[in-house]
Amino acid sequence: MPDLEIPPLDLERGVRMSWSEYQADFAEVDARVRGHDSWKLERAQHFEESTSSRQALKDGDWERALSLLDEGRGKLAQYAEEDRRKGSFFHRVRIVEEPLTPYLQWELHSLRISVEYGERVRVVPGALVRQWEAAGPLPEVVVLGGLALYRVNYTPEGVPAGGVRLDDPELVAAWEAFIATLYERGEDLADYFDRAVAPLPPPALPGGRDHQPA
């Protein structure tokens, strides 16, 4: 995508937050969103999450991990109704490297269900974003309803480690446009899932680990 330029991201101009502060701030801003979509750029191929389904994956129980994802449909329906009420929909660009890590294989199953309840997800191959990664991987970024941008931080092991909030309107708009353009050029999650994820066997978890070496 040589015609697309990545916006700057000067974190020194932002407000640094712990993980709990980030979650509280995100919820407060999200409650104010009306009539403006939100956008997420997700780059890393492994995260640590504290859900029962995620734990089942770590325990090597693939069938239970998928069953527990299905049990979350009620909550997803509530989120979808809230989004319709606010006139705001969540768009996610999921950067994918193949072969899939066990975590990502699991997450794509989760996102496939989310899509059924209105989340808009598209997949972009890692090869298409490497032109912007000479200094390191693209950041994990959320642009929330045109009101705020969050640079979400994780440890090298994928553990949540807080975030940085930036409110400059030009910066927020620039990153929203960047992620939206990636989204436009991505593949619908449902199509990618049917082609590349559904045929896969359960992920191998050697030694109890659920991610592959970088």
Image (spheres, rainbow, N blue to C red):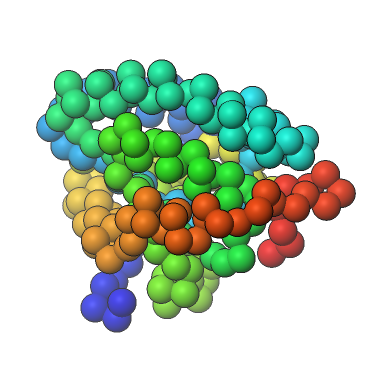
**Residue projecting furthest to the front:** 199
Near-viewer residue (187 or 167): 187
Near-viewer residue (198 or 69): 198
Seen at 24% across and 61% down, the residue is: 184
Q: Position of residue 50 (x, y in %)?
A: 63, 29
Near-viewer residue (160 or 17): 160
Near-viewer residue (129 or 165): 129
Q: How many marks?
A: 0
**Residue projecting furthest to the right:** 207
Q: Position of residue 128 (x, y in %)?
A: 41, 73
Seen at 33% across and 18% down, the residue is: 78
Seen at 52% across and 52% down, the residue is: 198
Q: Position of residue 102 (x, y in %)?
A: 66, 51
Q: Is residue 158 above or below residue 29?
A: below
Looking at the rendering, in which quadrant would you find the N terminus?
A: bottom left
Looking at the rendering, in which quadrant would you find the C terminus?
A: bottom right
- Which image quadrant is residue 77 in? top left
Seen at 50% across and 47% down, the residue is: 108
Q: Is residue 56 left or right of residue 128?
A: right
Residue 113 in sight: yes
Residue 21 in sight: no
Q: Is residue 66 left or right of residue 16?
A: right
**Residue projecting furthest to the bottom:** 2
